[in-house]
Image (cartoon, rainbow, N blue to C red):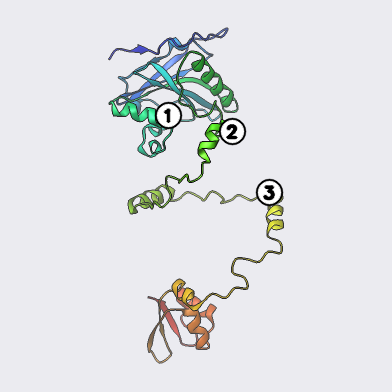
């Protein structure tokens, strides 16, 4: 397939704009091009290259720079989506992943319609900008393509999340009876293993972090004078048995007894529950010559 230029949607030039140097890349049935920008250039000069492998491309990603990109429809010859990412390769793969495509959005429906025809959208780098300026740059590129007649699939006019959602979008999202897509669904054992493998060795989100004093004061004021969930309430024996585990307890004479609730057994036989718990966890050899182990 010969190289094709993106349709001449807009002639947007800026003064002293430098012609970009391109670093090419692409995926199977998909295209991607990264460009090191010295300024904005006419959109008609952007190229996509379907014959270059995505694995051969690695973006120059300084910590203070992020990328504004567009998804190009090879059928209607238009940019259909404008987004921001720190890693073009991962974002392109995410756009095509079945997990992302499960949500019923305008963009996902468009991508699935292309995939059903055996075509993938192209990813084109539009601009590399400082991270603190990406929202303004994304809105600028969206305005450029909208003015040129592109049917963008973005739900908001640039920037983070739903800050700019229209009243119609908010009404649809908050409609009564709307059921979340993952309600009632359970992860398969393989998915649980994949999650555990991905998180192994990584610290928790709150590890090493502390709430500011103002947040702590609000939490204290909200809970002050209010009883805890189970304080003052007596849990029935049936619930205790349901929450308890089975234990094998050996008395001083060597007789083994199977019990359901270790704490209740200890109280009825004059044993200390904390010390029997230590025996159960191996930190004590016995308590008054009694031993126990979990069944």
**Residue drawn at point x = 48 percent, y = 75 percent:** 240
Q: Which residue extends farthest front?
A: 176
* Side (left or right) of 294 relative to 203: left
> Gap in Å between the C-alphas at discs 1 and 2?
19 Å
Answer above or below: position of 283 versus 116.
Answer: below
Pick whichever of labels 3 and 1 is earlier in the sequence. 1
Place of residue 83 in the rendered image (x, y in percent of width and height, measured from the top left)? 48, 26
Looking at this view, name the residue that lies furthest to the bottom.
253
Label 3: which residue? 212
- Give the residue pinned by disc 1: 107
Where, by quadrant of the figure, is residue 162 drawn? top right
Q: Is the residue marked by circle 1 packed among few (<14), some (14-19), or many (20+) residues within 10 Å?
A: some
* Label 3 SS: loop
Q: Element at badge 2?
A: loop
Label 3, label 1: how many angstroms apart (C-alpha)?
A: 39 Å
Disc 2 from disc 3: Cα separation: 25 Å
User: What's the residue at 41%, 47% (across, down)?
Assistant: 198
Lower sequence index among marks 1 and 2: 1
State which quarter of the image contains the C terminus: bottom left
Percent across and percent down for residue 159 are 56, 29
Q: Secondary structure at mark 1?
A: helix
| One can see residue 270 in this view | yes
- Few, some or many C-alpha atoms within 10 Å of disc 3 (few <14, some 14-19, many ≥20)? few
Q: Is residue 284 visible?
A: no
Q: Nearer the viewer, mark 3 or mark 1?
A: 1
Residue contact between numbered discs 3 and 1, judged by CB atoms under 8 Å: no
Q: Are marks 2 and 3 in contact (CB under 8 Å)?
A: no
Q: Position of residue 169 (x, y in %)?
A: 52, 33
Q: Is residue 116 left or right of residue 71?
A: left
Question: Could you say which disc has been placed on residue 163 in the image?
Answer: 2
The residue nearer to you, when weighing 113 against 241, is 113
């Amino acid at each position: 397939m010969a190289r094709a230029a993106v349709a001449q949607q807009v002639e947007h030039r800026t003064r002293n704009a430098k012609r970009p140097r391109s670093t090419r890349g692409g995926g199977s049935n998909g295209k991607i091009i990264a460009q090191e920008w010295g300024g904005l250039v006419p959109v008609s000069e952007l190229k996509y290259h379907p014959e270059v492998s995505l694995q051969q491309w690695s973006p120059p990603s300084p910590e203070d720079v992020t990328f504004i990109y567009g998804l190009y429809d090879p059928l209607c010859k238009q940019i259909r989506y404008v987004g921001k990412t720190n890693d073009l390769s991962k974002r392109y793969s995410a756009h095509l992943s079945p997990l992302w495509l499960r949500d019923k959005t305008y963009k996902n429906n468009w991508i699935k319609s292309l995939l059903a025809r055996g075509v993938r959208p192209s990813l084109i780098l539009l601009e590399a900008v400082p991270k603190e300026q990406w929202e303004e740059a994304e809105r600028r590129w969206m305005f450029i393509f909208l003015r040129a007649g592109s049917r963008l699939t973005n739900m908001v006019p640039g920037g983070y999340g739903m800050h700019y959602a229209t009243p119609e979008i908010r009404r649809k999202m908050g409609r009564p009876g709307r059921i979340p897509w993952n309600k009632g669904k359970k992860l398969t054992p393989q998915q649980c293993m994949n999650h555990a493998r991905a998180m192994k060795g990584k610290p928790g989100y709150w590890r090493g972090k502390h709430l500011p004093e103002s947040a702590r004061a609000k939490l204290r004021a909200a809970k002050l004078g209010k009883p805890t969930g189970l304080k003052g309430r007596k849990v029935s024996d049936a619930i205790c048995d349901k929450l308890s585990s089975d234990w094998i307890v050996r008395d001083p004479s060597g007789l083994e007894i199977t019990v359901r609730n270790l704490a209740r057994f200890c109280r009825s036989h004059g044993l200390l529950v904390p010390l029997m718990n230590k025996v159960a966890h191996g930190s004590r050899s016995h308590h008054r010559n009694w031993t126990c182990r979990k069944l």
